[in-house]
Amino acid sequence: MIYQGLFNILNYYFEESDLFYIDVNNYFKNKMRECIEINKVERENINEMLLDLLDLLKPLLLDIGFKENELTNTLYDPSLKITEEKKETITTTLDLFDKRIAQIIHGLIFEKICEYLVNLNGSDIILTLRKEKAFPIEFLVEIRQLKDLFLENPEKMESLNDYTQIKQQIIDKYCENKEQIESLEDLRETHNKIQLIYLIYRIINFFHLERIFDFQHIETYLKKHIDEWLTTIPLVSLRNPDLYFCGIYLAHQLGIKINKEKVKEFISDLYSEYIDEYEAPIIEGTSSLYYFVKSLESLGIKLEKDQIKELILADDKFFEPHRIKNFETSRLVVILKIYNILGVYNQIDKDKIQSIEEEIQKRITEDKIQQYRDGLFSSEATYYVLFYHYMTNKIDELQNNIIIDNIISRIYRNLELLTFSEDTSYDLVSELFYSCESLKLLNCIEKNSVIVHLARYLFPEKIYKNIEKAEDFNFDKKNFRHLAVDPTTGETIY
């Protein structure tokens, strides 16, 4: 998902990309012809048939030069599953190829094109496809011309080089530390580590590495120790969620059967605790309330209007500048996000909203977003400010802010420092995750201003200026997987 915007930029630049899609699709269709043109799809078995096609596709990709470790997370990404809604549009395996398999192939090859542009390892696959008449000469000429343009702009080549390697660098870091990561699930102390396991898993899930790791220990813990992870109260912050939320999230993602009625009863009882403990829950207990609201959403629990009113009740004094100036930037945004999730954002006093918005603006500089007024760059703050502007349809306001350079450099710094043990820094893992989430927003928010932001950092001036002027920029939803971000929750829409 951190390539979607990049692929859209390349697709816009290449005038002959349609020739490529036709040739490469025909090449793989011919290789898989017996399976994709004859078989009808039975809707109840559609995802099994998709897996069969992916199993056939894998050796074909290996034959043209892809490596095993480049394919595992892409071909077996759980989000490839066909939803009930989309099953209606697929009647044959040919449809499956056109609507799912082809998009995967295009994405994998475009990643190799990016590697070729920055002198990495993409040329062998391009040449192999060319020999197989699956790579039109017109398209190859355009790629070579673009590479020449990068050679004339070495600073942009360096930026694209750094960006292109992010995904594999993170995957390699996690795979190299597989044993250490799995050892964190030692049942004797799991209750002390569940927050860390949650944070580490978020990145595993982000890059779809689930098939690589063994989650048996955490599955057993969540099933058999439900009283422990429901009632233990740790230090809670946005980067250290409540144990119960970590448990609910992991159980949902890993498909673990837990006693949902018991969990729902526990969550429902939390409401009265917020009302009794805080004068203004949304201001005084922001982080804890945020994970409470997210848990309600995950479990399908609806609050009554009077309950929502109690949770968001806060006197004007709580919004005075001298009070909120010491709040973290992410906390300020989360207050607004809670309003939005609860469906009351437009009902809140405009002066209260304005007070928070004005304080957020004080954290935004030309080249970075700070967690505090006079603080350093923060990936967490960057993500929440990007999301706030997306949530409120103000993303265009950030078009001229140069923030992606700090995001990239923070990823590489944190990867270098990160070790996996019981002493692993939560802040390092959290900042790495929020850096990735920021890149997801910059790639999946399909607005011209966001694409310009990405193009300005990654491409020579000639290209991003053309995109900046474009009135009809085409976001390709046919030839590549199209992922979106929910403007209320921030979750990925597959």
Image (cartoon, helix red, strand yellow):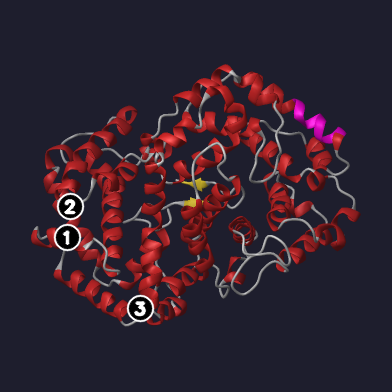
Q: Is residue 331 magenta?
A: no
**Sequence order check: which comes first, mark 1 or mark 3?**
1
Q: Badge 2: how crowded within 10 Å, few (<14), some, or many (20+)? A: some
Residue 475 shows up from this direction: no
Which quarter of the picture shows residue 229?
top right
**Would you identify the image quadrant in which residue 353 lies?**
bottom right
* Mark 1 nearby-residue class (10 Å; few <14, some 14–19, many ≥20): some
The residue drawn where x is 32% and y is 77% is: 150
Q: Is residue 440 above or below residue 494?
A: below
Q: Which mark is residue 154?
A: 3
Mark 3 to mark 2 CA distance (whole Å): 27 Å
Instruction: Give the label on residue 366, or none.
Output: none
Which residue is under mark 1?
124
Label 3: which secondary element: helix
* Left or right, residue 420 beside residue 127: right
Tell me the CA gap for discs 1 and 3.
23 Å
State the separation of the CA atoms marked 1 and 2: 7 Å
Q: Residue at x 70, y 66 (%)?
A: 363
Task: Describe residue 103's horizontal placement relative to residue 79 as left or right.
Answer: left
Residue denoted by label 2: 65
- Residue drawn at (50%, 65%) of the image: 447
Measured as percent of width and height from the top left, residue 15 is found at 27, 72
Look at the magenta stretch and give its main secondary structure. helix
Residue range (magenta): 269-276
- Given this view, does label 3 or label 2 mark the residue nearer the observer? 3
Name the spot of residue 168 as percent of width and height, x first.
Answer: 36, 52
Residue type marked 1? Asp
- Residue type at tag 3: Pro
Q: Are marks 1 and 2 in contact (CB under 8 Å)?
A: yes
Q: Earlier in the sequence, mark 3 or mark 2?
A: 2
